[in-house]
Image (cartoon, rainbow, N blue to C red):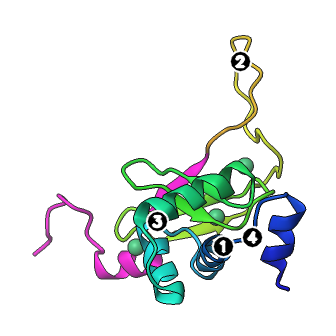
Amino acid sequence: MNRFSTLLRSLRIPVTVQRLAVLRAVEASPHSTADRIAALVRAEIGVISRQAVYNVLGTLVEKGLLRRIQPAGSPALYETRVGDNHHHLICRGCGKTVDVACAVGARPCLTAEDDAGFLIDEAEVIYWGRCPACRKTKPVSPGAPEHA
Ligand SMILES: [Zn+2]
Ligand SMILES: [Zn+2]
Ligand SMILES: [Zn+2]
């Protein structure tokens, strides 16, 4: 009995080989796209359609077992770290994605100057920049003149 089976049962979600394989794949490879998760799941259990993987991901996100983040210009990324309001650092060069704890810890962690009457429940925070490896390999920013 592994903890993912227990977790699924506690939420009254039928335990299936597919669901367990998806959870294991996302845990092993956080911030993966659905396509990468599908490849990992196939390596573990054999044939599974892309649509089936999407369906499983959708159910697990809906039930709060997975978190989906949707960075601008990127396919959705999935992770098993749920229940905290952590944010992400994403490299503009290679797409490397790193968790960063929220300084406040609870949603929404930014106060809007004017909420316009909305009941705000979330502020989406993504830090964009260049990871250490990309800073090393491309010290000159694109378009910047080369110095002789
Ligand atoms: Zn990078
Ligand atoms: Zn994360
Ligand atoms: Zn925060």
> Which amino acid does the dot numbered 1 rest on?
Leu
> Which amino acid does the dot numbered 2 rest on?
Asp
Q: Identify residue for label 4.
A: 15
Q: Identify residue for label 2.
A: 115
Give above or below for 28 relative to 99. below
Q: Identify residue for label 1.
A: 23
Q: Is mark 3 within 8 Å of ligand 2?
A: no
> Which amino acid does the dot numbered 4 rest on?
Val
Question: Secondary structure under badge 1?
Answer: helix
- Residue 89 falls in image quadrant: bottom right
* Start-end of magenta stretch: 125-148
> Which amino acid does the dot numbered 3 rest on?
Thr
Ligand 1 placement by image quarter: bottom left
Q: Position of residue 72 (x, y in %)?
A: 42, 47
Q: Position of residue 137 (x, y in %)?
A: 30, 81
Quadrant showing the C terminus:
bottom left
Of all residues, the one furthest to the right in this rendering is 10
**Label 3 close to label 4 by CB (< 8 Å):** no
Question: Secondary structure under badge 3?
Answer: loop
Front of the two marks 1 and 4: 4
Q: Is mark 4 within 8 Å of ligand 2?
A: no
Q: Position of residue 25 (x, y in %)?
A: 59, 78
